[in-house]
Image (cartoon, grey):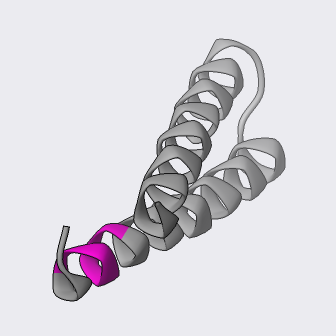
Amino acid sequence: MDAMTKMWVSLIGIGLMALAALLITWARYKFKGVIRFIMSSVAFVCLIVGGILGFISII
């Protein structure tokens, strides 16, 4: 993997982690019940995928 590809993979990973932080904050502040659980689940998936992409970019 060349340097430019690693850069883009890393930036996408960082973006997904930031999106996860925003989603979880928004879900806990604004919603209740099932919608809150769904938003939190989406945030968790974004966090996991972002972490995997970050790990891939340093290999």
* Residue for point 60% across, 53% down: 20
Determine whether 31 is above or below 4 in the image.
above
How far across and how far down the image is residue 57, in percent?
A: 42, 65
Left or right of 33? Residue 17 is left
* Residue for point 17% across, 78% down: 2
Determine whether 25 is above or below 2 in the image.
above
| Residue at the far top in the pictured view | 34
The secondary structure that dominates the magenta segment is helix
Q: Nearer the viewer, residue 31 or 50?
A: 50
Q: Nearer the viewer, residue 2 or 7?
A: 2
Q: Tell me where the magenta segment starts and ends, as one range.
A: 5-9
Q: Nearer the viewer, residue 56 or 16?
A: 56
Figure disc tally? 0
Q: Nearer the viewer, residue 33 or 47?
A: 47
Q: Quadrant of residue 1?
A: bottom left
* Residue for point 53% across, 32% down: 45
How far across and how far down the image is residue 14, in percent?
A: 52, 71
Residue 46 inside the magenta-drawn segment: no
Determine whether 36 is above or below 15 in the image.
above
* Residue for point 25% across, 86% down: 3
